[in-house]
Each structure stands twice: as structure tokens, then as C-alpha cells.
């Protein structure tokens, strides 16, 4: 009876035995990368909206302050999505016949609200609060990216827990003065760690221990 | 296996007790089984989880589950990476004033129960009422509530509520009802309403009273009847007897040094109980150096919350109560007769001398179940002791028309029987279910040519009426009502009626020429008229100092009623007055006028009632959880362990150990009780401290049309209640049926194996050695642990619970359930010890079984600094926070249940099955959006209301200030009428909690295990009278 396996099979067998570790490791890496990919996190995916609203135009070109529409960002956990009334304030005068704005006018006429698709969606067991972040020196662009240059809004961060907790462990890396919170152009300077630490002290930001306690975000 | 629902070994109990005499026996015990140390009990105790805790009893069997799991294992990784479905954000079209998404708003309103208001402050999230609190600015509430108010939010969203008008069982419309009603009323008009009858519950609403007044003008010959199964009728009759005019009696426990209760359950009976608890507990608060407390004696038949807090409690049979009370009155110098001997004599002598030492600062009160004569005697004694004007004051009656309601219902029954009633409109209540059984009310109702019933549920009464109109919940209604002190609260709605329900105001408006008036207009217009002084047309008696326009007692007498006035012109400041009244939750300057009265004592000349022959007697009582049956479909209340028995989902016949033993009865045995041709079958339960040969039945169970939750729970005790003996019946026959019934009690659940848990002492002991509780254990030194010591430099949350103050009212349990989205599990699951309450109130008995002392102990997560649960969690789902709370991370939990096994306090709860209702739409609106809704397979437990802590922390940090003491109130603390629970930062030496923890009475539960609990207890102190000794006293004699 002839040999069933060619001699080279030995090498393959040895390689696969030693390689199993690496193959497994590789597979794990693929899985973890997959888990962090935009496919799972939804980052960098622009979503269809009922109205083709452009932040680049409104916040960027026209320079409208974030808080003109997101009125409750300093007061509440929820930053607020503007009511149709806010759109109509201007659009009863300008672009009042634009077909793009028909859904807005329809909402105003019929009293039926617009239904936006949520872009930044945290799991239901996470309780994020906008007001405490903007009050403690975390600017909009730190999490939301250059919104003033986004024609369609998209999520720039993964919004995964490792991303949240990176800041909660070392908030000094991102803190900025309260006057710069809504400044989309703000960039950390070279001595950010130093100024950040000063701000952390000045704004009475709690210790890492407190900020990384589970109940800070999970209730 | 669980404890078998049969003989707990009475003989062995007795022998154990006998053996223990002299050395005191087992001092604290929770159940007869524990006292007897039966085999079943020990087996039960030593199982990791009770009965078949690991069994899957849902449709997917265990085998099939494993098969599915095996098949899906390969895909497990992938399935964990599901992409969340896209959510919608739906903004307003026009912004709503004051609403900030993500922040709740609070509105003042009131819930009426038996016609009397409980003032409330209700939390609303985006227009959805989610949580009820007491109105902190209202003198009756001071921020606290009772369990009924707490649970009412579930009542609002109950999917079983009636959702439409029905006619003969078919769906109909309000318009059709109006047409039919107005046709029949049109026929009544020329006859001045001679065939028209209204049956309502007790009414204190000034607007409703004025509307009824208007009706009298339209239909002068109509009759208005009122009926509540258990209400203040006896008080009304007694007031008539003593003062010849209706009054409301106000008790001031804050001024009373010695209190004697004659079967008065004043700590749990609505109305007034919230303020009573606050004052009573406040007078007994040994805090901040105060070493004085009032002394409280209770004579009662069946142990109540109130009796449980007594310094000296005596079991007195209901039939004996009159003689007993007369004997006390005679000892106080009244010519009242009455003769007692033996232990009762001794007790009375001690009480009387104590009362006489405290003239003007003592207080005697009688229970609402007691016949008028007992109330009259109590009044006479209070007058003799000079308590009128100090501890007892009087005011105009709360009710719009206080009458003898039993007589009123009897009169209606007669008219119905005689065929004199053509149009019968029943406004609220459920008389077919609650009326005395001998009236056969279901047959009578059908004799009316036209009958309509307004109620929240299509219940037993609706079934026998032609028309049923769905009623609006109080959270959907505009109305007004008086609280226990007479203050009027405007009831404002927090949400549009979910099912187009109507209020009583709107129903009564249908009788007038403006049938479609909205509740808001009716209430507002009434107050507009009153504010401008126009409503002062109500005839007032001379010398009566009622505020102009107050609906004084005889408002509905046949005096000519004011004709419907044209809409008044609002006075210029009305809008301000109205908004302020609605906002604050009470109408300013509107309390009832105080009265000075003199009690007549000529009733003493009347012959005393029949003497007690010692026959078997039956007492009828409201249920502590579901009241008269109206809350039967409320799962929170059904599952609430009753304070004294820890029974859920059922009612029982309570009987004393002695009486059960002599009849060969044990727990769960079904007996048949017969009285005057009426009979009922009921399971029995042995109640330590119950008077002998005396059975207590709780009303409200055995509903047939309550809804999915309440149907079929318990037995109907109304079936044994006759109109001649509505409160207690003597000479009842008892027959053992031989059947046994499973009762789901939580009394033995979560037992802590006889360790030194509840600690009590007398005032004398406390004065001698104030740290008597703490010295009973030795706390290990802080460094005696393998784990690194953690320093808490910032906030350190902690709680102190004063056991002297706690009255076991259960409001905290319901508040916790409402705040933290805790599910209801059902009777079967409770029986398997799977109830989900994060907070439980343990009951302990102390001493002899005939008349033990009672202790209540609220137990919740201790938030141990050395938490045993944290060490054993394999996935770090329960971890410590930097501020000392023991956090539970639901999304990490994989359900090993190791934590629960390792918890010495047994406060962790596991979702064995899918208990949460994720399907019913209306219940989704009820949930607290700040707390995660847990699913199957997840462990949960008390979080110290972490959502409230975080809310306060964020608000304070935004303002750059430390959190103020008292800014964070846990749900249990906020609702506690006794102020027994105090929460705060123990690192702040000036905080209330830190001060309480430095009290000498403070002790940590099982602190000897070195768990370092953050929750600690202040031991019970009783102010005993040395003449009577304690029940576990040196003499060894049982009092």
C-alpha cells in the first residue's frame, strides 16, 4: 500500500500545530477589529434623514451657534432636537419654497413632528449626560468631531465603552476652557496636558476613581 | 421543598416554649415554624435557593434549551455583534413651555381615597406621570405618602381598566349614554326627581358638593345616598350622639405623652395616618440628646401595625371591648359601669394611673370599626382628662354631608325593593361587591328602570347596571378634595384621559342643562364663584364660622338650593389665586374652622350592650394592601407582603394559636364559617397575639371582575358580612372542611439563621446604658481583612434606619418598586421565594406566642465596604464605587448567582424568568426612564437610588458647590412618614445621617462578620410601664 500522505504533509502538520496559536490569535484580532469597525459601531456612517439638513451650511458657513437648536445641552442630559418651529423661524422667510424643505413645511402645516434618525445611539443601560460634560470643559467637537464641516451628520467616535473610559481616566487630555466649548475650530495646544490639568483642578473635576465608577454611567 | 402548609408542630412549639421558660426561650422569632425549629424549616433554610430555583418552568424546557444553545454556540460570537436598530428622535412641532427633555417636572395634585384627599407631588417625564411623592408643603403629608398613593401610578396605566362606555355589555358611546340618561331624566323632571337616586362614595369635594346642590334644585325629591364598606360612619354617629352636630376630630400625637388606643389603627387607617405617623414617631424620637418619649398602650383584637408599636399591648376580644372601655371610663371617674378582673384589671389600673398623671397631655382614641358607643366613651374620657383643646381638637366635618352610611344604603335598598327607584346612578364605588351580603344588592340594582355606574373598571357593579361609564383616574382629572385636616387641594391632571374616561363632575354635569361641560371648567368656575364670594349662598347656621361658601354639613338638606348662577365675573386677582392654589397643591386660607365642643355624657345612662359570652366571633377589617377591594387589580399591592402576616396575593382567617390548637387547625386548613345563613370558606393562618376565639377576616378579596391580576385571588369576606353586624359578628360557626390551601408568605424567606439581628430595649435600659445594642457584638478591627483598605475621601453614601420610628407601613416597599422599575412575579413565584422587592420589611416576634412584642425591620442592600458579593462575581458585574456604593452592572451580569449566595443579608434578587412586561404598551409609559429595565437572567438589588444620587451630583457640580445635606433622598426615605430612614454623606459630620450614626443606639447588622455595612440601624426602644413589666419581663409572666 502506497503512502497516503506526501512527505511534505509533515511540514504542514507541524506548521499548523505551531501556527494554531497564531491563527487563533489572528482570528481573535479579526473579531476584535470587526467589533470596533464602523460596521458594528456605526461610526462614519451617514444616515438618511427626512430632511437633507446640512450642519456644514448652518453651523459652518452661517455660523449659527450649536445652542440655537440644541437648546437644552447645558441644562439636561439630552441636548435637544429642535422643534419644527425653530426651522420655521427662518424658513418662513428664506428658502420658503424650496422643495428640500417641503417635509418641514408639511410638519408645520399638519402639526406632525419630523422623525429624525438617531445618529449617536448609546445602549439603553448607559446614561450619558450632556450638561455635565459641557459644563466641565468638554467641547462639542471632542466627541462629535468637526460638525461644521459635515454636510450630513455622522458619528466620528466609536461610542464604545473603551472610548468613553479613555477620557474618564485622563480627562486632562481633552479639557478646554468653558469659553471654547462651542468653538468647532478649537485644537489642543502643545501643552494641553498642562493646561488640561489646570482646568481639571479649576473645574473641580472628580478623581479618576469617581469618574470610572460603574454607577457614573450605568444605573 | 418549602415549608409544608400544614401542621407547624404546635405541640413542639409548646414544648419548646415551656422548656425555654425561665431562661427566656428563643427571644426573637419570625414564624411559628422557626420557633418550633421544625425539620421542614431547617431544610428550607439550608437550601441555597428555595424550591426548584434552578428549574425552568417556562414553555422552553431545559432539554430543548440546551439543544438550542448547542446549535447556536458556533454563532454565539457573531450574534453578540448585533447592530442596534436605528432609533427615531421625534421633536415637538412647537416647543412646550417648561419641558426640558431629560428632566422631570413635578405637579401638585391629590388622590382621593374614601373621599378624603392625600396631597401629592407627582413626577412627570415628558407628560407621563411616573412616580408619586407626598406634597412636602402640605401639612398633612410633609412629603410622605402611604402605599396606596405610591401604587396609584400603576393603577393609571393598568391595561385592564375600562376603556369605553358600555350598554348591557356592548360597546357604546358617551353620546349614546347622554341621550339615554337625559331621556329618563326628562321624565323625572315633572316628578321633581322622585324616582331618581344617586349613590356615591364619601364626598369631601366642595365642587362636587355644590354640583349636588344644584341637582337638588333641579330635582328636589331625588335622594343622595353614600356608602363606603368601611369608613368614618361610626365616628359620624358618635359625634351626633355626643355633640349633636357633625364634627371632625383631629388628634395631635405630637402633644400626647400617654396614648391609649381602643382598637384604633391610627398609624395605618386613612385619612390622617401619614400625619399621625409623623407626629407619633416624632414624639418618640430619641435623637440629638432627647431622652423623652411618649408611652403608648393598645387594646386590640387582632395585631395591627399600630398595636405592634405599642409599649403595652393587650388582646381584647371585640365583644368584650365595650365592657372593657366602660371599665376604663369608670376608673377615670365616669359613671360608665363595666367590670373586669384578672390581667385586664391590672392592665387597666396601670393605664388609668398613667393617664391621670398626664391630664391634658394624654389621648384616648377608638378605631373606626368600633361601634359608636366606644367612640362616645373615648370622647367622654378625653373630656374628663382635659384633653379637649390640647391633644384632641374639633373642626367642621370633612365630608360634604356626613351621614350614617349603613343606614343610607339600607334606605336605598328598601326603595329599590319597593320599586320606587326609576333612575339609579352609582358614582364610583362597587356596591354590588361591597354591600352587606344580606341586602342582595346585585338583585336590587336590576330593579331600577335605568341604572348607570361610573367606575375605573368594568366591575361587579357594572355587570348588573345597564350602563357603565369608564371613569378617569385622578391623574387624568380636574377635581378638588379635602385632606384630613380640612385643607382643600385642587386635583390637577398630569395626562389626558388615556381612555376618554369621565370624572364624577362631568357625569353630574350631564344631569344639568350644560351636559358637555369639561371637568376643568366646572372646577374652575366653582372656585371663581367662591373667590368672588358668590357661592356664599349656602345656608349657614347662626354662630357657624365656616369660610364663606364652604359646603357646610347641611348643605344638602332640603333647604332651597341656589339656582344655577350665571357664569360669574372673575375678580381681578382670581387668576393669581387659582394658579397659586393649583401650583401649591392647596387652596390658601381654606382649612376648616376650628370648633369648641362639649361632650354630653347622658348616653352613659343608656344600658350597656350585650355582654361577651366568649363565643367564636368574626371581625371584618379593610385589607392592608388592597383596601376594600378597589386595588385588587394592582400587582404591586397584591404582591406586597402584609405587615403582620407577610402574606401575599391572598386573604386568610386569622386565628389565635390557642383557638387553632383546640380545633385541630393548622396553617392553610380551609374552614367554613357560617353566620345567620351566610357562609364563606377561608384558609386559616395562626396569628400570634390574636385574641382567643376570635377570627379576623380581611375584606376586598375574592373579586370576580377585578381584572387579570385580581380575579380569583383570596376569598370574598363580604359574603359573611350582614347589615346588622357589619363590624363584628358573635356566635359564628366554624367547620373544618379538611381541604388545604397554599398560601404564599414571605415570612421565612431570606432568613438570617437566628443571628443577632433585631435589637430592642426599654427606655430604662437605654437611660442606664445607651449603647446596649452596639455592645452586643464585637466589630473586627479595620485591618483584619485580606483585601486592601480603601479610603473614601469624597462623598461616602450611607443610610441609618431608626427601628424605634419604623411602623411597618410598607410605603417604602411600593415606593422602591415604583422608582426602580421592579417587576411583579405572581403568587406561584412568591411561593418559590422569588419575589423581587429590593427592600423588604422583616417582621419579628419577641417572647410569648400568646401576646408577643412585634418588631419591624426594613432590610435593603447594606452597601458593605467589604462586600462579600463583590469578591465572588466572576465577571465583575458587582463592584464598588469610589463613593462606597455597591454598584450592580446589569449588562455584565451573566447570572451565576454566586453573589446572592455569598450575601449574608439576602438582599439580592434574581430574574429567574422574564418577569418584566416588555409587551404591554401602557406599562412602558409608567417606567422610570432613569433606571434600566432588567430582563431575564440578571441579578439586581438596591442601588441606594443611584439615579437620584447622580442627578444631584450633576446638578451640584454644574453649580460648583457640594451636595447639600438632604438634597438626595432615596425613594424609601422620601415616602417614609415616620422619618425612620435617613440617607446622606457620612463623611460630612454635620449631615443628619452622620449624626444618627453617632447615636449610641446605632448598630451594624451582622457587623461582626466584618462586612462594614454602610446601612446601619438604630435599636428599638420601648417606653414600658414598670407596673406592667415587659412581656419578656423578669417575672416571666405573660401580660
Image: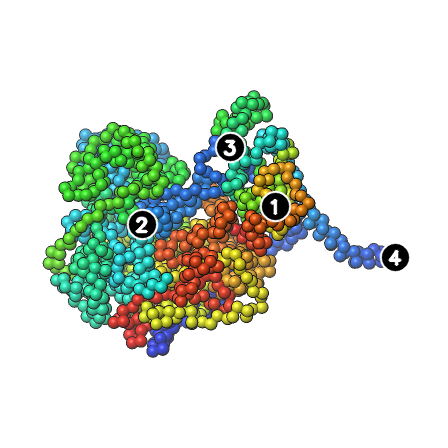
Residue under the point 82% across and 58% down: A14
Residue A190 percent location from the top left of the image: 68, 45
Query: Going from the N terminus, do you reach mark 1 or mark 4 first?
Result: 4
Residue indicated by mark 1: A175
Q: Nearer the viewer, mark 1 or mark 4?
A: 1
Q: Is residue B920 left or right of residue B531?
A: right
Name the quadrant containing residue B385: bottom left
| Same chain assignment for discs 4 and 2 | no
Residue indicated by mark 3: A83
Residue A7: which numbered mark, if any? 4
Spatial separation of the CA atoms under disc 1 and disc 3: 31 Å
Q: Is residue B633 left or right of residue B259?
A: right
| Same chain assignment for discs 3 and 2 | no
State which chain disc 4 sits on: A
Residue B529 percent location from the top left of the image: 26, 33
In what element is the residue under mark 1? loop
Residue under the point 51% across and 48% down: B960
Mark 3 and 4 residues: CB-CB less than 8 Å, in contact?
Answer: no
Spatial separation of the CA atoms under disc 3 and disc 4: 75 Å
Residue under the point 54% across and 25% down: A91
Residue indicated by mark 2: B140
Amino acid at each position: 500500500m502506497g503512502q497516503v500522505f506526501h512527505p511534505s504533509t509533515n511540514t504542514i502538520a507541524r506548521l499548523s500545530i505551531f501556527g494554531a496559536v497564531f491563527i487563533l490569535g489572528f482570528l481573535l484580532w479579526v473579531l476584535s477589529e470587526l467589533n470596533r469597525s464602523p460596521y458594528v459601531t456605526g461610526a462614519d456612517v451617514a444616515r438618511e434623514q427626512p430632511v437633507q439638513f446640512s450642519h456644514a451650511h448652518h453651523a459652518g458657513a452661517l455660523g449659527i451657534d450649536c445652542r440655537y437648536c440644541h437648546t437644552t445641552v447645558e441644562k439636561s442630559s439630552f441636548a435637544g432636537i429642535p422643534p419644527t418651529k425653530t426651522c420655521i423661524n427662518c424658513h418662513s422667510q428664506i428658502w420658503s419654497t424650496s422643495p428640500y424643505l417641503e417635509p418641514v413645511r408639511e410638519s408645520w402645516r399638519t402639526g406632525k413632528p419630523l422623525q429624525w434618525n438617531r445618529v449617536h445611539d448609546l445602549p439603553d443601560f448607559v446614561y450619558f449626560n450632556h450638561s455635565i460634560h459641557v459644563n466641565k470643559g468638554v467641547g462639542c467637537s471632542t466627541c462629535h468631531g468637526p460638525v461644521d464641516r459635515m454636510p450630513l451628520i455622522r458619528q466620528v467616535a466609536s461610542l464604545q465603552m473603551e472610548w468613553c473610559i479613555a477620557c474618564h481616566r485622563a480627562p486632562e487630555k481633552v479639557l478646554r476652557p468653558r469659553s471654547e466649548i462651542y468653538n468647532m475650530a478649537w485644537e489642543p495646544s502643545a501643552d494641553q496636558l498642562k493646561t488640561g490639568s489646570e482646568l481639571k483642578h479649576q473645574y473641580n473635576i472628580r478623581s479618576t476613581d469617581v469618574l470610572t465608577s460603574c454607577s457614573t454611567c450605568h444605573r | 421543598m418549602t415549608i409544608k402548609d400544614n401542621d407547624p408542630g404546635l405541640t413542639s412549639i409548646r414544648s419548646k416554649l415551656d422548656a425555654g421558660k425561665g431562661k427566656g426561650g428563643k427571644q426573637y422569632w419570625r414564624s411559628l415554624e422557626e420557633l418550633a425549629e421544625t425539620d421542614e424549616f431547617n431544610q428550607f433554610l439550608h437550601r441555597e435557593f428555595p424550591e426548584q430555583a434552578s428549574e425552568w418552568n417556562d414553555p422552553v424546557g431545559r432539554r430543548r434549551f440546551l439543544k438550542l444553545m448547542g446549535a447556536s454556540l458556533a454563532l454565539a460570537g457573531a450574534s453578540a455583534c448585533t447592530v442596534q436598530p436605528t432609533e427615531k428622535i421625534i421633536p415637538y412641532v412647537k416647543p412646550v413651555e417648561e419641558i426640558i427633555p431629560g428632566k422631570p417636572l413635578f405637579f401638585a395634585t391629590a388622590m382621593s381615597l374614601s373621599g378624603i384627599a392625600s396631597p401629592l407631588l407627582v413626577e412627570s417625564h415628558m407628560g407621563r406621570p411616573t412616580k408619586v411623592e407626598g406634597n412636602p408643603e402640605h401639612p398633612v403629608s410633609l412629603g410622605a405618602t402611604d402605599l396606596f398613593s405610591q401604587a396609584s401610578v400603576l393603577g393609571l396605566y393598568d391595561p385592564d381598566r375600562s376603556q369605553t362606555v358600555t350598554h348591557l355589555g356592548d360597546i357604546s358611546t358617551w353620546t349614546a349614554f347622554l341621550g339615554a340618561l337625559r331621556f329618563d331624566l326628562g321624565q323625572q323632571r315633572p316628578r321633581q326627581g322622585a324616582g331618581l337616586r344617586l349613590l356615591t362614595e364619601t364626598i369631601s369635594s366642595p365642587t362636587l358638593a355644590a354640583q349636588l346642590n344644584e341637582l337638588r334644585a333641579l330635582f328636589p325629591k331625588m335622594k343622595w345616598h353614600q356608602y363606603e364598606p368601611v369608613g368614618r360612619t361610626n365616628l359620624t354617629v358618635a359625634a351626633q350622639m355626643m355633640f349633636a352636630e357633625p364634627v371632625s376630630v383631629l388628634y395631635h400625637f405630637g402633644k400626647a405623652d400617654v396614648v391609649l388606643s381602643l382598637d384604633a389603627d391610627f398609624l395605618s387607617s386613612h385619612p390622617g395616618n401619614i400625619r399621625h405617623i409623623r407626629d407619633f414617631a416624632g414624639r418618640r424620637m430619641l435623637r440629638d440628646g432627647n431622652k423623652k418619649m411618649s408611652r403608648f398602650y393598645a387594646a386590640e383584637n387582632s395585631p395591627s401595625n399600630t398595636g405592634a408599636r405599642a409599649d403595652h399591648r393587650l388582646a381584647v376580644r371585640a365583644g368584650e371591648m365595650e365592657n372593657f372601655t366602660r371599665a376604663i371610663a369608670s376608673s377615670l371617674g365616669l359613671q360608665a359601669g363595666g367590670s373586669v378582673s384578672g390581667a385586664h384589671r391590672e392592665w387597666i389600673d396601670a393605664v388609668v394611673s398613667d393617664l391621670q398623671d398626664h391630664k391634658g397631655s394624654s389621648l384616648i382614641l377608638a378605631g373606626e370599626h368600633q361601634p359608636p358607643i366606644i367612640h362616645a366613651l373615648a370622647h367622654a374620657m378625653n373630656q374628663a382628662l382635659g384633653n379637649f383643646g390640647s391633644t384632641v381638637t374639633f373642626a367642621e366635618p370633612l365630608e360634604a354631608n356626613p351621614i350614617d352610611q349603613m343606614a343610607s344604603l339600607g334606605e336605598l335598598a328598601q326603595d329599590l325593593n319597593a320599586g320606587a327607584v326609576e333612575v339609579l346612578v352609582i358614582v364610583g364605588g362597587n356596591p354590588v361587591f361591597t354591600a352587606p351580603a344580606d341586602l342582595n344588592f346585585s338583585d336590587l340594582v336590576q330593579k331600577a328602570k335605568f341604572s348607570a355606574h361610573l367606575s375605573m373598571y368594568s366591575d361587579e357593579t357594572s355587570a348588573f347596571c345597564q350602563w357603565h361609564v369608564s371613569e378617569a383616574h385622578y391623574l387624568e382629572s380636574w377635581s378638588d378634595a379635602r385632606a384630613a385636616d380640612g385643607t382643600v387641594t385642587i386635583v390637577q391632571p398630569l395626562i389626558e384621559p388615556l381612555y376618554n374616561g369621565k370624572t364624577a363632575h362631568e357625569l353630574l354635569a350631564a344631569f344639568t342643562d350644560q351636559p358637555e361641560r369639561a371637568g376643568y371648567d366646572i372646577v374652575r368656575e366653582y372656585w371663581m364663584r367662591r373667590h368672588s364670594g358668590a357661592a356664599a349662598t349656602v345656608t349657614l347656621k347662626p354662630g357657624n364660622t365656616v369660610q364663606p361658601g364652604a359646603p357646610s354639613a347641611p348643605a344638602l338638606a332640603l333647604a332651597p338650593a341656589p339656582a344655577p348662577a350665571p357664569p360669574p365675573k372673575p375678580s381681578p386677582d382670581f387668576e393669581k389665586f387659582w394658579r397659586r392654589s393649583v401650583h401649591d397643591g392647596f387652596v390658601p386660607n381654606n382649612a376648616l374652622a376650628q370648633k369648641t365642643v362639649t361632650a354630653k355624657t347622658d348616653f352613659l345612662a343608656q344600658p350597656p350592650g350585650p355582654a361577651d359570652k366568649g363565643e367564636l366571633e368574626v371581625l371584618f377589617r379593610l385589607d392592608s394592601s388592597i383596601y376594600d377591594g378597589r386595588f385588587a387589580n394592582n400587582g404591586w399591592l397584591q404582591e406586597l407582603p402584609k405587615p403582620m402576616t407577610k402574606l401575599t396575593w391572598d386573604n386568610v382567617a386569622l386565628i389565635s394559636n390557642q383557638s387553632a390548637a383546640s380545633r385541630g387547625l393548622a396553617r392553610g386548613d380551609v374552614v367554613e364559617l357560617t353566620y345567620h345563613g351566610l357562609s364563606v370558606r377561608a384558609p386559616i393562618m395562626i396569628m400570634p397575639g390574636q385574641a382567643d376565639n376570635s377570627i379576623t377576616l380581611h375584606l376586598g378579596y375574592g373579586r370576580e371582575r377585578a381584572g387579570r391580576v385580581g380575579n380569583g385571588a383570596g376569598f370574598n369576606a363580604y359574603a359573611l358580612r350582614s347589615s346588622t353586624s357589619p363590624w363584628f359578628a358573635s356566635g359564628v360557626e366554624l367547620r373544618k372542611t379538611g381541604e388545604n390551601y397554599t398560601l404564599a408568605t414571605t415570612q421565612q424567606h431570606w432568613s438570617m439563621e437566628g443571628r443577632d439581628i433585631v435589637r430592642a430595649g426599654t427606655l430604662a435600659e437605654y437611660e442606664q446604658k445607651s449603647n446596649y445594642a452596639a455592645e452586643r457584638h464585637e466589630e473586627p478591627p479595620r485591618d483584619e481583612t485580606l483585601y486592601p483598605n480603601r479610603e473614601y475621601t469624597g462623598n461616602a453614601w450611607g443610610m441609618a434606619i431608626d427601628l424605634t420610628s419604623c411602623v411597618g407601613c410598607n410605603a417604602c416597599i411600593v415606593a422602591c418598586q415604583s422608582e426602580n422599575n421592579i417587576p411583579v412575579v405572581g403568587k406561584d413565584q412568591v411561593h418559590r421565594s422569588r419575589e423581587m422587592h429590593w427592600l423588604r420589611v422583616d417582621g419579628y416576634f419577641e417572647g410569648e406566642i400568646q401576646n408577643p412584642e412585634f418588631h419591624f425591620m426594613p432590610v435593603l442592600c447594606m452597601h458593605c465596604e467589604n462586600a462579600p458579593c463583590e469578591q465572588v462575581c466572576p465577571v465583575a458585574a458587582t463592584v464598588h464605587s469610589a463613593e462606597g456604593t455597591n454598584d450592580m452592572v446589569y449588562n455584565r451580569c451573566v447570572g451565576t448567582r454566586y453573589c446572592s449566595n455569598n450575601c449574608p443579608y439576602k438582599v439580592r434578587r434574581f430574574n429567574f424568568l422574564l418577569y418584566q412586561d416588555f409587551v404591554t404598551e401602557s406599562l412602558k409609559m409608567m417606567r422610570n426612564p432613569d433606571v434600566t429595565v432588567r430582563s431575564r437572567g440578571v441579578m439586581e438589588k438596591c442601588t441606594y437610588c443611584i439615579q437620584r444620587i447622580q442627578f444631584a451630583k450633576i446638578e451640584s457640580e454644574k453649580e460648583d458647590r457640594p451636595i447639600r445635606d438632604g438634597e438626595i433622598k432615596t425613594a424609601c426615605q422620601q415616602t417614609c412618614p415616620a422619618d425612620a430612614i435617613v440617607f446622606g454623606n457620612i463623611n460630612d459630620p454635620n449631615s443628619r445621617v452622620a449624626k444618627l450614626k453617632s447615636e449610641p443606639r446605632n448598630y451594624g447588622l451582622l457587623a461582626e462578620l466584618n462586612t462594614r455595612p454602610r446601612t446601619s440601624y438604630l435599636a428599638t426602644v420601648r417606653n414600658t410601664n414598670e407596673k406592667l413589666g415587659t412581656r419578656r419581663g423578669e417575672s416571666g409572666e405573660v401580660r
